[in-house]
Image: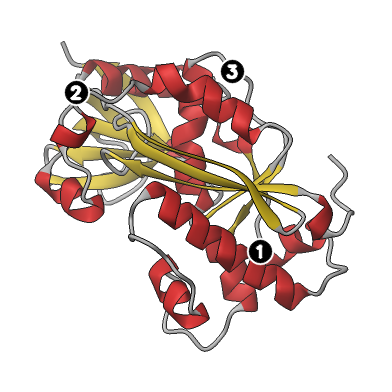
Amino acid sequence: MNLDLPLHEYTFVAFDTETSGAYPVGYDVVEFGAVKWYQGQEVDRLQFLLKPREAMSDFIIGIHGITNEMVKDAPLMSERIQQIHDFFKGAVVMAHHAPFDMGFLAADFEKAQLPLPTEPALCTSLLSRKWIHGVDNHKLQTLVKHLKIDGGQAHRAYDDANACLQVGLACFQKMGEQATLAQAIKSQGKNLWWKDYSLQALRDEKVRTLIEAIKSKKDVDMIYQGGSAKGETRRLTPIGIVRNPDGDYLQAFCHKDQNAKRYYLNRVGDVALVF
């Protein structure tokens, strides 16, 4: 894709996911919403609920308000992932805290053996830090109020996707009408490419073992070359794998410390499943 065209010449898809938990592999998308924008107008939209593998906790339900009853008869992601993939085709996606949403969808694309999109992504959280000032924070709902956007129902996928789009457009306006996609990417401070959220690209056998442990709900004994117990074997319950521009990591419950912790993958030593 040519990144040097003015922003108004691209098709954008702003999207949002609501999930059954915070981490890919261990949790699932339970609602997907997206709006497609081209040359000043909405040209298409998607929104649907999805059934997760397991029931959601009261804590998670309290965040987005999507109940287990609401998704009981919803389709599985495997039934809708091709539709999402087709909707993204040829578009520059944007999301608020994009790495979170991209991590979940990249895992689902690969699970369905679909190629990851090759177009770049924009994060409206990062863009807003550069272009929108005078706010206490850069949470989506804070920006909605500051920009006087009709944000709809917070933490529902289509409404948040549309709010994300409006934040993105507000940033574009501040950049000027001749601003290019390359300039927008540079202004957000990080390059966001789908390939960087690929789990299949993590070919290390230790990572494959961790992914297997998450899917099969098995504990692992792992040596970690970091933290206060550097080099010691610790028993963990892996929760999810996160690809992150600041360092890929495992989120896991540590049996010794009795809390959930982050373990950077580049510091993981030997790993063995506990049977």
Helix, strand or loop at disc 3? loop
Above-or-below relation of 214 to 245: above
Q: Amino acid at mark 3?
A: Leu
The image quadrant where one finds the N terminus is: top right
Residue 21 lies in quadrant: top left
Residue 190 position by quadrant: bottom right
- What residue does disc 1 label? 188
| Residue linked to disc 3 | 114
Q: Do callouts 2 and 3 mark residues in contact (Cβ within 8 Å)? A: no
Residue reaching furthest to the top: 275
On the image, which quarter does residue 267 sit in?
top left
Sequence-earlier tag: 1 or 3: 3
How crowded pointer 1 is (Cα within 10 Å; few <14, some 14-19, many 20+) is rated as some
Which element is circle 2 on? loop
Out of 268 and 138, give the one closest to the viewer: 138
**Earlier sequence position, callout 2 versus callout 1:** 1
Reading the image, the residue beneath label 2 is 219
Q: Is residue 86 visible?
A: yes
Rendered residue at 32%/29% (across/down): 50
Of the two numbered discs 2 and 3 on the same chain, state the one appearing first in sequence. 3
Q: CA distance from mark 2 to mark 1?
A: 38 Å
Up the image or down, 242 lies above or below 162; here it is: above
Residue at horizontal 48%, vertical 33%? 105
